[in-house]
Every structure is written in structure tokens, then in C-alpha cells.
Image (spheres, helix red, strand yellow):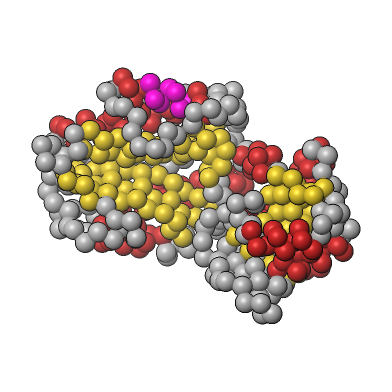
Amino acid sequence: MSPTISSFEFEQRRQYAAAAATAADLEGLLVCSRGGGTLDRYADVFWLSGFYTQFPNIPDVPGNWSGRAHALMVMKGDGEARLIVDVPAWNDVALDNAQITFADHVPQAVIATLQDMQLDKARLGLVGTDAMPAKIYRMVTSALPGLDLIDFQDDFNDLKSVKSPAEIDLLRSASALGSRAIETMMEAGRAGMTHGEVMARCLDVLVPARAILYNAFIRSGSGGAEPRFVRSSLPTWGSGEELRDGDFLCAGISGVLDGYYFDLARCRPIGRASNAQIDVFESTIAVVEAGIAAIGPGATGEEVMQVGAARQRELGFEQTGNFNGFGHGIGLGWDDPWLAPGVDKQIKPNMVICVEKWLMRDGYAGDYEDTVLVTQGGADKITNARMRWW
């Protein structure tokens, strides 16, 4: 059976969140998440309750519905919680039915809930600022002019960054499945295959296992005097050009199993590997391994990034692209800490972190990413996909 989060743990999380709000001189929290088939920004309400809305994110139709694909939770400083949803909640939601309101007009139900809980003139922490549409925000604040909403996202992210034993089990399961999926893609990397055919092998693994693909970067090509680079944006596996002997293939995938993410990347040659290909492939692994070796309690995100960046420079690769990070925490999405410049948050035991790098030289590319569990002594890998395909 799949690991699960107990109702007791959800209740503990709500109590932790309420205590953090009280410590920040707030009277409670207003938490917003988005669902509707997307895996962007469902985490906050799900972390507190286990609820995910499946309804698609459709435009409002006045007099009929508003706020589809959004769920909001109202919490008091004592931990009392009410959940407002756009679809009926199933039995796996860790709240009593009396605490759940199903509404076609989600913003109006939120307003009514705040009034009923006597929080309509309160100072509340707002979580999910990037998931709450401006239209819902305006409806709530216009109807309740005495309500003071304070951005509480960073504090809430801190609560989610250290994982419980049950979450670690879920992340291990997700990473193991992601590992099998990326291996299947690499095995399919043969001359004559298209990116879409390689991607189909990934879905053959994920769909029967009840997992959802969130994102995929698939790129291929050849280097040397006349480099060639093959990619697509919509979808990312949409190129119809077939792989050729002498090409490289790079694939990075992320997805969700039982709410928790996997995220990893691998690369391989098509046919016999050239020395130039192997140099880039091995350098990418070496940079990631250097970053992983720097992870441990007390290190900061920037310190880990700097170790990886130093190894990258030693191997003769300059920083390219507009993403200077070397990775991120992972859980119900991308979590703290980010391994990036200026990030001074300290790494703690039981954080789960992805370390990643994409390198390119002379037209040859390498992509590599692994996930680790932070321990008292350093970091242990929880991805177990084959590392080398050459």
C-alpha cells in the first residue's frame, strides 16, 4: 500500500501554522490554492487538509459561478479551520464535513466564512499569494474593508520545508517511480525515435502507477563544427525530428505521486558516444555530485550553489542561461531552500532537495539531476536511476 499522511498529522500541521501566525501577531490565516488539472500551486491547502480540486480553471460567469479550480482555508489562531471548495470533498480530506463548505461562488463563501468566524476585521496572514487571482482578492477585500491581509508565504514555506517521516516515505516512493520513468526514456533513446515516442514510454510507466506528469524537458542534437539543437515548446516533446546516431539526448521530468513530487534528469548518446559527449556528460554529473557533497545541516543554499559553481568553473564551463540556481527543496512542489545566489536559509535534517545542472560546450549538452534527503551527517540520494548510459 502507498504511504499516507494521517489525519493526526494534518491536524498537527494546522496547529503549527496557527502558532506561527500567532507568533507573528496575526489573528489567523487565509490560505489559497489552485488545482483544476494543473500542478502549479496546489500545495498550501493540500498540506493543511489533503484537499485538491479537480475542476478546470474556467472564467467566472456572473450569477452562476466564480473561483472555479480554487480552494481556500480560513484559520483562527487557535487552529480552528474551515475549508471552502468548488467541488464536493471526498472522504480522504482530513477535516470533518461540518468544517467544509462547497460553493459555486467561492469568493462569496469565503466572505461569509470570515464573517461567521468573526475574522472580517482581523489581521490575517495571506498564504498562496501567487495562486489567488486578483479578482478573488478584490471581491474579498472590497466586501470586508476592515480585513487586513499580510503576506505570510515565507513563514509558511518554512513550515513545509522540513519533512515528516510520512512525507519522506512518500517522496521516496515518488522518486523511485520517477527513476523508473527516466530509465525507460533513456532506454528508448535510439536512432529513429522522436521525442514524443520517448515521452510515451515515460507515460507508460507513470499512468498505470497513478502518477501525473508535471513537466518534461526533452532536447537532442549534435555538436562539433556544425552543431544542431532540437527542441519544442508546446508540447516540450513535440519535435517530429527523429534521433540520429551521433546525437545526444537530454531529458528532465517532474511529476506527482500521491501529491508528492519527483524531479530528475539524465542524458545519453544516441549510438556510440564520442569523447566530446562523454566529457560534457561526466562534467554535468561531477558538478551535481559536488553540490550534493556540500549539503548538510547548517549549510546555506548559496554555499551549496557556490561549491557547485566552483566545480563547474574548474571543468571549464561558464555559467550560461538565466537560471543561476543549482536546485531546490521538493515536497508538494518546489520548496525551500533554493540553491541560488543570496539564499541564506540554512539547510536542516529531513529536508529533501534536488540538485541539478545543465551544461553545454561545443554544441554538446548534458543534463543531470538527483534528489537527496538531508541527514545529520550530509545527504543520502533517494533517486536511484541509472547514472550513465555510455
Q: Relative to residue 137, is residue 338 depicted above or below?
A: above
Q: Is residue 313 left or right of residue 34?
A: left
Q: Is residue 310 above or below residue 73?
A: above
Q: Is residue 80 visible?
A: no
- Image quadrant where residue 207 sits: bottom left
Residue 305 is one of the magenta-drawn residues: yes
Residue located 62% across and 59% down the image:
133
Q: Position of residue 280 (x, y in %)?
A: 24, 33
Front-lying residue, 181 or 354:
354
Asked if residue 360 lies in the magenta stretch, the reply is no
**228 to the left or right of 87:** left
Left or right of 220 on screen, residue 329: right
Q: Residue at x 39, y 25 (%)?
A: 309
Give the magenta range: 304-310
- Predominant secondary structure in magenta? helix
Considering only vertical position in the picture, is 244 above or below 154? below
> Which quarter of the rendering shows the N terminus?
bottom right
Give residue 70's position: percent from left, percent from top. 63, 64
Marker count (numbered) = 0
Residue 53, image x, y percentages: 61, 66
Q: Residue furthest bottom?
A: 64
Q: Position of residue 327 (x, y in %)?
A: 46, 36
Do we see residue 210 in this rendering?
Answer: yes
Quadrant in the picture for residue 119:
bottom right
Task: Give me the residue at 32% from left, 40% from top.
Answer: 367
Q: Quadrant of residue 192?
A: bottom left
Q: Residue furthest right?
A: 118
The C terminus: image quadrant: top left
User: Could you tell me which residue is drawn at 40 percent across and 26 percent down?
Assistant: 308
